Image (spheres, helix red, strand yellow):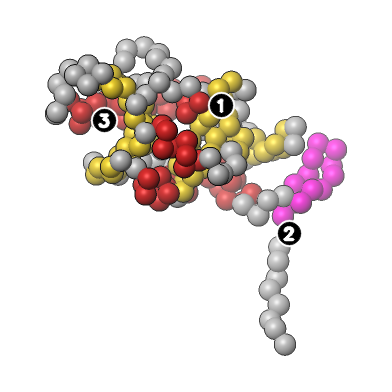
Amino acid sequence: MGTTEAVNQLYYIDSEGNYHKCHKLLPDIRRIFGEIEVMNGELVEIITNKQAGKNFKDSLNIGHRSEDAVCAKIKKKYPKAHVMEGYCKGYDIYVPETKKKIEVKQDKKSNYTGNIVVEIEFNGKPSALSTTEADYWVFDDGEIYIWITPETLRQVVEPFKPVKFVGNGDNKEKLAYLIKKDIIKRNALKVDKY
């Protein structure tokens, strides 16, 4: 006779008090992204407006530091490379010597989750991978830089289903792929250590 394994069913309660079975990863989602609730049938993170404003500023500063660090590496070979001033939707760094554009994505949380976030939509509008003008994307996880072309990245994410969530530092929903870092590394042009 085979052994039986106890299976814990996970449920969430909607606004009317009804129970619904939820995904087995919900506890991990809560642990990683914080408290969540269901809104229009989708899981969303619960944060206050004050938290969102503070987290956005923190995230922006962290992002700028990543851009500066990647640009410093590029400048060793191409001294005219520079981070774009102000808001530049399509890319973060321009290299005049090669006329190449680079987008930098900081994702230190991937060291805990094993997944890299590849955003395609923010607040219902195309963003990030959907609108990039960059020739290269660089993922910075705090330990390595992963260089990949947007075309290759699109091929990598294509078989997967994107998910909607409100990320730390945001107060609006994004649509993004959560892709195993190892898959992106296998398809990368190069992986540099810090």
Check the image and report above or below for 191 versus 76: below
Q: Is residue 15 magenta?
A: yes
Most extreme residue toward the bottom is 1
Looking at the rendering, the stretch of residues picked out in magenta corresponds to 9-21
Amino acid type of the residue that numbered disc 1 sits on in the rendered structure:
Glu
Mark 2, residue position = 9
Amino acid type of the residue that numbered disc 3 sits on in the rendered structure:
Val
Find out whether the residues at labels 3 and 2 contact each other: C-beta distance under 8 Å: no
Q: Position of residue 83 (x, y in %)?
A: 28, 19
Q: Mark 2, residues whose alpha carbon is within 10 Å: few (<14), some, or many (≥20)?
A: few
| Mark-to-mark CA distance, 2 and 1 | 32 Å
Any mark on residue 70, and which? 3
Most extreme residue toward the top is 86
Amino acid type of the residue that numbered disc 2 sits on in the rendered structure:
Gln
Q: Position of residue 162 (x, y in %)?
A: 59, 38
Mark 1, residue position = 121
Mark 3 or mark 1, whichever is nearer to me: 1
Mark 2 or mark 1, whichever is nearer to me: 1
Q: Position of residue 73 (x, y in %)?
A: 20, 31
Q: Position of residue 125 (x, y in %)?
A: 59, 20
Secondary structure, mark 1, is strand
Q: Is residue 54 visible?
A: no
Q: Quadrant of the N terminus?
A: bottom right
Q: Mark 1, residues whose alpha carbon is within 10 Å: few (<14), some, or many (≥20)?
A: some
Q: Is residue 1 magenta?
A: no
State the residue at coordinates (42%, 33%).
Answer: 151
Q: Please state if 187 lies on the left or on the right of 20 as rendered.
A: left
